[in-house]
Amino acid sequence: MHRILFTVWKFPVYSYGVFLGLAFLFGILFAIRRAPRFGVSPEAVIEAASLCIIGAVLGSRLAYVILHWDYYRQFPSHIFSFREGGLTFYGGVLGAIALTVPYLYLKRYPVAAFFDLFAPPLALGYAIARVGCFLNGCCFGRVCPFPFFPLGVRFPHLEGFRYPTQIYAIGYSLVILVLLLRLEKGCRFRGELFLDYLALYSAARFLIEYLRDEPFVVFGVFTLGQVACLGIVLFAMVLRGVLRQRVVA
C-alpha cells in the first residue's frame, strides 16, 4: 500500500485525499460536459457540485464516525482526521442531497434533471475514490484463502491475504457507469436515471458486503450495510415503477 504518495516540505500528501480530490474533479468535468443536454449551465453545475462536495464530505464522515463510535469515543481527536480515510458512501449521498436540494429549489433549477445529470459522474467519481481506498489500505475484505491477485492481496498492516474489495468496487462502479449511459436513452421521466443508479449500486454493494470485513449485526444474517442496500433497492424500484406508470397513463 502507499498511504503517502509524496511529501511537500515534509508535509505528507495522502493517497486517499489525492484520489478523493481527483474523483470530485473528474466528476465535475464529466457533469459539465453532460450539462447542455439537460438545459443546465456549467455555472449551475459548479454551484451544485460545490455544495455536493461539502455535504458529501461532512455527511459521509458523520456516518462513518457514528458507525465506528466505539473507536472515536476513545480517540475523539481523530474524528476530524479526514486524511486518514473513513467516509461512508450513503452518508455522503444523504449529506449532498440535504445541502444541495434546498439550494436548487431556491434557485429554481430543475432538481430532477440535476439528479440524472450527476448519476454517471457519481459512478465515475466513486470508482476513482476507491483507488485511494486501495492505496490507503482501508475498506478491505475478509481473510481470503487464495493467495494471488485479484482474489487475494496482502495488506501490510493485516495478517494473511484479504479480498481486495476496493478493486471489486472500482470494477462494478465502472460497469454501472456503462449501464447508466445505455439506460439513459430509454428513460421516460427526469430522475429515473438516478433511481437506476441507486438500485444498481445498492445491489452490487449488497453482494460485496459478503466479502468485506464487517461484522454481521442484524439477526446474524445481514450487515447493517446490506439492510440499507435492500431498503434502497426496494425504494428505488417501487418509486421508479410508480412514476413510469404515471408517465404512460
Image (spheres, rainbow, N blue to C red):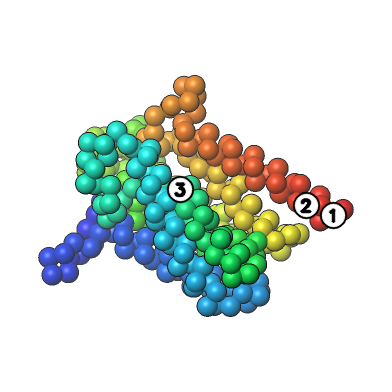
The circle on residue 248 is 1
Give the number of the mark in front: 1 or 3: 3
Q: Are marks 2 and 1 in contact (CB under 8 Å)?
A: yes
**Horizontal placement of 59 versus 158: left or right?**
right
Q: In the current view of this chain or complex, which residue is farthest to the top? A: 219
Task: Report, in whole angstroms, how far the alpha carbon at label 2 lies from the one at label 1.
Answer: 6 Å
Please give the name of the residue rendered at 34% of the width and 51% of the height, measured from the top-left corner.
133
The circle on residue 244 is 2
Q: Amino acid at mark 3?
A: Gly
**Horizontal placement of 65 versus 31: left or right?**
left
- Ranked by sequence position, the earlier of labels 1 and 3 is 3
The image shows a total of numbered marks equal to 3
Q: Amino acid at mark 1?
A: Val
Which of the 4 image quadrants contains residue 102? Answer: bottom right
**Horizontal placement of 4 versus 40: left or right?**
left
Position above or below: 28 against 1: below
Task: Report, in whole angstroms, how far the alpha carbon at label 1 lies from the one at label 3.
Answer: 34 Å
Q: Quick one: label 2, few (<14), some, or many (20+) residues within 10 Å?
A: some
Q: Which residue is mark 3?
A: 91
Q: Amino acid at mark 2?
A: Arg
Task: Report x, y in % for residue 106.
Answer: 58, 67
Which of the 4 image quadrants contains residue 108? Answer: bottom right
